[in-house]
Image: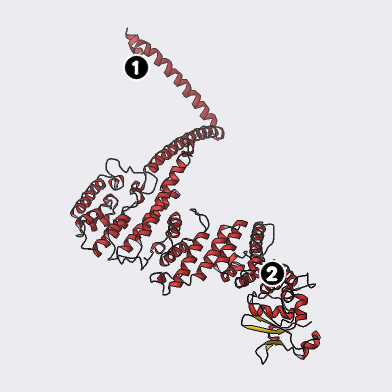
Amino acid sequence: MGVVTVGELKPSISGKRTFRPSSSIRHATEWPISDVSSDLTIEVGASSFALHKFPLVSRSGRIRKILLEAKDSKVSRISLPSVPGGAEAFELAAKFCYGINVEFTLSNVAMLKCVAHFLEMTEEFSEKNLETRAEVYLKETVLPNISNTISVLHRCETLIPTSEEISLVSRLINAIANNACKEQLTTGLQKLDHNFPSKTTTNMEPETPTEWWGKSLNVLSLDFFQRVLSAVKSKGLKQDMISKILINYAHNSLQGIVRDHHAVKGCFPDLELQKKQRVIVEAISGLLPTQSRKSPVPMAFLSSLLKAAIAASTSTSCRSDLERRIGLQLDQAILEDILIPTNSHQNTHGTIYDTDSILRIFSNFLNLDEEDEEDNSHLRDESEMVYDFDSPGSPKQSSILKVSKLMDNYLAEVALDPNLLPSKFISLAELLPDHARIVSDGLYRAVDIFLKVHPNIKDSERYRLCKTIDCQKLSQEACSHAAQNERLPVQMAVQVLYFEQIRLRNAMNGGHNQFFFGGMNGQFPQRSGSGAGSGAISPRDNYASVRRENRELKLEVARMRMRLTDLEKDHVNMKQELVRSHPANKLFKSLTKKLSKLNALFRINSIKLNGSESRFPFPKRRRHSVS
């Protein structure tokens, strides 16, 4: 049989749609009733179809029941307002009833499946009916392939609620999840085979989800996307793959807000668009993987999502969740990631950046660091602490130093805002602990910029602001600048000069800036071998450093003893070898014997002299002759 398209149904003069097949179609399908006048008109929405009862009743159980239940046996008009897929779907189903071969495709299989269920075109009324044919196509062509399944699932969005009632949506979602996990397993095996040197495989990296089927999910509505992602999560899809899918979907659904950081500064031109964006941001935030320090979600995406959340005025819980996630990975952030613009609707002071959000992010980072210390304190015993320290080179301390530099750069940037309140700036400057900064030059620079942009602040605020700077951690250049800076309070200038004088005195005495890094009264004892000033060392780090240095000294003493023993053995062996191999060894031996005899004689005479308390080793015989 030939394939007939939807265009074979043409409107008649009366406005009704009736079959007028071409001669080739008529010959191929042998239409016995093509020229018979219609006896049944079916209305589907705004369209009406002039058809015949016999071919429809032979395959559709619903139409048969309607005609049987009708009081008027000569009914000639039926209204079907809720046909899934509308007139297009009914037209294909009617053609199938007339025996025309309908081609199944990815774009119409869901529609044909739903309309077949609606019209009850099952095996009960005809063999190989429309619903059976659609089911075969689904099992053979759609469900085994992820991309095909996603395409059909997208078509189901316009077929609700029928596609939900017949469980077509759930079947497609489960098929996507199962096939995705199979692909993940296959990709893992391919990587495993590729790593074996004995295998001769092509040098090709397996495709990522965004390269093979992840991008196909962009066509889905938010509801279907959430259901698909929840299904693949429950089936065990890796979090890094889920993150890539989420990022790709967010970039395509948020209409450039995640990509364009400048778009967040203004308000949304349309309230409906803002509401839509709010729903999408909250949904994506809820689908993010579990919070952790090693989260697969990039910092740049979390920052962009938070900017979009602030612009769309999302819920407080959504923004708090994103701020906590950023705080977990704050040591991976750059300055652009934390330059978060304020919401124009909620900005009462007219500031450029949302400092309150940044204050919460940095507080989350510090609180999480303290929580980790409390959790690990009861798990570590004395033996474990011998091998595990928190030093300036450790991950925790290095992350704190990175965050402190990030904070100083952020303060220097927001200090340029003339509308920023001094209290906000002071809260940020006082947030980090003392041991977080090795050198205070960055903080001093930010404070100086703020004082220059805000010349009319109160003296109390100026003093409190400068009090956040540790003058002992300023470099020589910063001290020279601060001593001549008229914007600073007199107290700070005097303090800078005092510390500079003591540092110069120590340098002349050979102290090598010990006071600069050592502090007063041993408050910041210098740490040998750390490569960093102890001003950036917490008390727990200092204790760990002492333990490490003691252990290193013990190991060094043990190594020196072993080295000394080896040298003594080498010396003895060299002497023996010299005696055996020298050509004049006999002469050497004879001299050695004579020297040994003389040595023995010296010892005997010494013993005698000691007995007679004589001062001379050889007595004079002349004395005996005279007597």
Residue 416 at x, y percent in the picture = 29, 65
Position of 576 compared to 475: left or right? Answer: right
Quadrant in the picture for residue 543:
top left
Q: Is residue 530 visible?
A: yes
Q: Residue at x 73, y 81 (%)?
A: 95
Does residue 593 lie above or below 484 as drawn?
above
Please, what is the three-letter code of the amino acid marked with disc 1? Phe
74 or 314: which is nearer to us?
Answer: 74
Please, what is the three-letter code of the amino acid marked with disc 2? Val
264 or 390: which is nearer to us?
Answer: 264
Residue 621 at x, y percent in the picture = 36, 12
Mark 1 crowdedness (10 Å alpha carbons): few <14, some 14-19, many ≥20: few
Residue annotated with mark 1: 616
Q: Secondary structure at mark 1?
A: loop
475 or 149: which is nearer to us?
Answer: 149
Residue 459 at x, y percent in the picture = 19, 56
Q: Give the alpha-carbon distance from disc 2 to disc 1, as whole Å.
A: 119 Å
Q: Which mark is residue 346?
A: none
Residue 35 at x, y percent in the picture = 77, 90
Q: Residue at x 68, y 90 (%)?
A: 12
Q: Residue at x 29, y 54 (%)?
A: 475
The residue furthest left is 490
Q: Quadrant of the C terminus?
A: top left
The residue furthest front is 71
Position of 302 compared to 474: left or right? Answer: right
Residue annotated with mark 2: 142
Position of 446 compared to 90: left or right? Answer: left
